[in-house]
Amino acid sequence: MEIPQELADHIDEVITHYPVSKRSATLPLLHLLQEHFGYISEEAITWVAAKLELEPINVLELVTFYPMLRQNPVGKHHIRVCRTLSCALAGGYSLLDTFCKHANIEKQSGNHHAHFFKSADGKYSVEFVECLASCGTAPVCMINDDFYEAVSEESVPELLKKYQ
Ligand code: FES
């Protein structure tokens, strides 16, 4: 894992924000590494642990607890579909299926327990996430950093055209 000097310097600076306990810098560091690499690798977990003088398990437990942290490399464009109650009732599950269909993502039919799917060409990935805090405009999704509300299945092909 190669960390560019600029990112390494930024990480060192972020750690100084937590003079009482370096451990508190774990989440900020994980977010920075995910932003740069697209996901949190095992190597990244070991690296963060060494940097903050922790055991790798202390870092891994955060990575597996918080849904916004990913252990899989995402596609060029990453789609997050909310599946919490309001969105589930408004068609969130079916919306994810529609994204998969139009993004050429093979998904085992009926498997709503898996969280993450990716197209064979690496162009798109899609995952279920929990409440994105816009329950009144369900169903909602995010594509990369863009937020979309009241997303209809009919709008999916047009939406995907923006992300080529
Ligand atoms: S349930 Fe989907 S945004 Fe809250």
Image: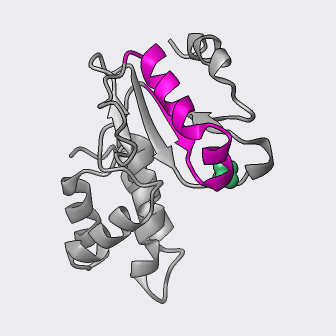
**Total marks drawn?**
0
Compare residues 81 and 95 and report the one nearer the observer. Answer: 95
Compare residues 162 and 90 and report the one nearer the observer. Answer: 90
- The picture places residue 56, in percent across and down from the top left corner, at 21, 72
Residue range corresponding to the magenta coloring: 77-104
Check if residue 85 falls in the magenta segment. yes
Compare residues 156 and 24 and report the one nearer the observer. Answer: 156
Q: Is residue 130 visible?
A: yes
Q: Residue at x 34, y 45 (%)?
A: 114
Q: Residue at x 58, y 12 (%)?
A: 157
For residue 45, what is the image quadrant? bottom left
Furthest residue to the right? Answer: 136
Q: Residue at x 26, y 79 (%)?
A: 53
- The picture places residue 34, in percent across and down from the top left corner, at 40, 48
Check if residue 148 falls in the magenta segment. no
For residue 161, what is the image quadrant? top right
Say whether residue 44 is left or right of residue 86: left
Say whether residue 37 is left or right of residue 141: left
Q: Residue at x 59, y 39 (%)?
A: 92
For residue 133, what is the image quadrant? bottom right
- The picture places residue 95, in percent across and down from the top left corner, at 56, 30
Is residue 44 positioned above or below 4 on the image? below
